[in-house]
Image (cartoon, rainbow, N blue to C red):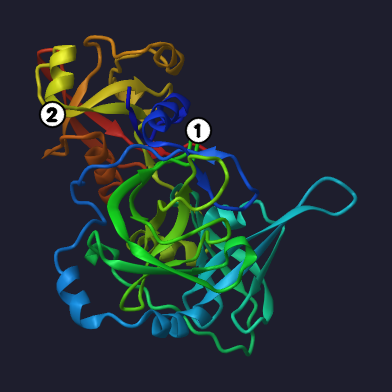
């Protein structure tokens, strides 16, 4: 059973299902954390904020730079971030971890992953010339695993990285990464864009990150927060997660980056010192296919079949119905119950054919407190429900 979430709080069963199909992934650093499985691959979104562009191949053919030249230009914009977590012990810090970051202005503002800096009591940034500076977290977007920190760089000249357009990339485009895997500072690796539009879930109760870029460029623990770079020398993603089927925290040729357009969308809020929140609907579901429609005797051939509605969620308050009564019931079941779940076929007048289309529409077009109108097929009946979105629970 392969389920996907749209703002669902209890994701254990969904993650377990996805892990059985796709494998297990691991967030890089900060504390050598446990395995984190990626959710299922997403479908093309409604008005999505990212995707594969048609103009990429044309511009790439005439604009690609040698890897050595890109490295020379971008290396000064990539930093190592050392995070110290202070425990309750009187004997000092509980541990240190290292990740990477991207300088985005001359004032010391650095873009990185939220998991690189989360829970840190002390941050130190090391630049390419080996100078160091203390840093503070400015703003975060935990739902997208992004954060902005600012280093104390009075009088120091910095080289910001140019931020590109992740919508313009195509599968097969060459890419580079620069980062600090295993604390090997300034490591360059090369690969291609292996896929776009991937969806990654970082663990139970976390918001799935959609439209991620998949690459086979070698990335390892310590690359978190560093740049994924196109062959023009522009940052197109923030390296975030890797596939980890063996549990050994090493590269197997599949890694994921948050698109830079996602980061650019929320950079103004993060640099202003805010914690970015995302709208929450509160369902888990499965894409309706002709096969699923036949198995469950559904009256439609496409849409988002609602399997679970989270208790206390906006979806529950609006009266949306799931096939299972609870997460535990879904966990015990080896198959979908016949009927019982609503099928969402349109949102705000836009037809949808998958769970990810619905989720991408919410991410791109809606904010907390907005009301959306769902067209739902319930058995043989068409039902219209108005849902007021809430904030993703923490």
Q: Splitting the image into 4 quarters, where does residue 18 fall? A: top left
Horizontally, is 129 left or right of 271 in the view? right
Residue 262 relative to residue 351: left or right: right
Residue 301 marker: none
**Depth order, front residue of 282/114:** 114
Residue at the (61%, 88%) spot, across then down: 156
Q: Secondary structure at mark 1?
A: loop
**SS at mark 2?**
loop
Q: Which residue is mark 2?
A: 302
Q: Position of residue 201 (x, y in %)?
A: 43, 40
Return the x and y of residue 52 as percentages of the image width and height: 21, 58
Looking at marks 1 and 2 on the same chain, the residue that comes earlier in the sequence is marked by 1
Name which quarter of the figure residue 74 lies in.
bottom left
Label 1: how many residues lie within 10 Å, few (<14), some (14-19) or many (20+)? some
Where residue 188 sits in the image (x, y, percent)?
Answer: 48, 72
**In this picture, is 133 found above or below 220?**
below
Residue visible at 28% across and 17% down in the picture: 321
Residue 151 percent across, percent down from the top left: 62, 74
Separation of residues labelled 1 and 2 (CA atoms): 28 Å
Occupied quadrant, residue 152? bottom right
Q: Label 2: how many residues lie within 10 Å, few (<14), some (14-19) or many (20+)?
A: many
Q: Which residue is mark 1?
A: 204
Is 363 situated above or below 39? below
Nearest the camera: 257 or 326?
257
Residue beneath the point at 67% across and 82% down: 131
Residue 309 visible within the image: yes
Which residue in the rendered view is the most extreme toward the top? 338
| Residue 228 left/right relative to 44 | right
Which quadrant does the N terminus fall into? top left
Answer left or right for 162 relative to 380: right
């Amino acid at each position: 059973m392969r389920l996907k979430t749209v703002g669902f709080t209890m994701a254990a069963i969904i993650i377990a299902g996805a892990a059985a199909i796709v494998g297990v992934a691991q967030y890089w650093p900060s504390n050598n954390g446990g395995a984190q499985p990626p959710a299922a691959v997403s479908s093309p979104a409604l008005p999505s904020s990212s995707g594969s562009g048609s103009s990429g191949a044309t511009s790439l053919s005439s604009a690609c730079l040698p890897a050595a030249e890109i490295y020379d230009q971008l290396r000064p914009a990539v930093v190592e971030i050392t995070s110290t977590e202070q425990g309750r012990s009187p004997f000092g810090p509980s541990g240190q971890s290292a990740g990477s970051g991207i300088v985005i202005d001359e004032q010391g503002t650095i873009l990185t992953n939220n998991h690189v800096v989360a829970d840190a009591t002390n941050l130190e940034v090391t630049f390419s010339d080996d100078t160091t500076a203390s840093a503070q977290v400015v703003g975060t977007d935990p739902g997208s695993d992004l954060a902005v920190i600012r280093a104390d760089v009075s009088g120091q000249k910095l080289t910001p990285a140019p931020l590109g357009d992740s919508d313009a990339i195509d599968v097969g485009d060459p890419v580079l990464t620069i980062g600090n895997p295993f604390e090997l500072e300034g490591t360059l690796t090369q690969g291609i864009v292996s896929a776009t539009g991937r969806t990654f879930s970082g663990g139970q109760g976390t918001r799935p990150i959609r439209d991620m870029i998949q690459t086979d460029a070698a990335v390892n623990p310590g690359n978190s927060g560093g740049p994924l770079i196109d062959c023009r020398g522009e940052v197109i993603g923030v390296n975030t997660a890797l596939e980890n089927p063996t549990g050994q925290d090493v590269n197997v040729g599949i890694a994921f980056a948050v698109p830079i357009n996602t980061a650019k969308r929320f950079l103004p809020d993060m640099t202003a010192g805010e914690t970015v929140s995302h709208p929450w609907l509160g369902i888990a579901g499965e894409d309706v296919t002709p096969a699923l429609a036949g198995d469950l005797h559904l009256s439609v051939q496409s849409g988002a079949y609602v399997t679970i509605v989270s208790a206390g969620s906006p979806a529950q308050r609006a009266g949306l119905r799931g096939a299972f009564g609870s997460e535990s019931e879904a966990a015990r079941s080896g198959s979908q119950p016949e009927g019982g779940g609503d099928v969402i076929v349109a949102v705000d007048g836009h037809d949808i054919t998958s769970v990810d289309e619905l989720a991408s529409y919410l991410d791109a077009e809606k904010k907390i407190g907005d009301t959306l109108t769902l067209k739902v097929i319930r058995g043989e009946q068409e039902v219209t429900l108005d849902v007021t979105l809430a904030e993703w629970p923490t």
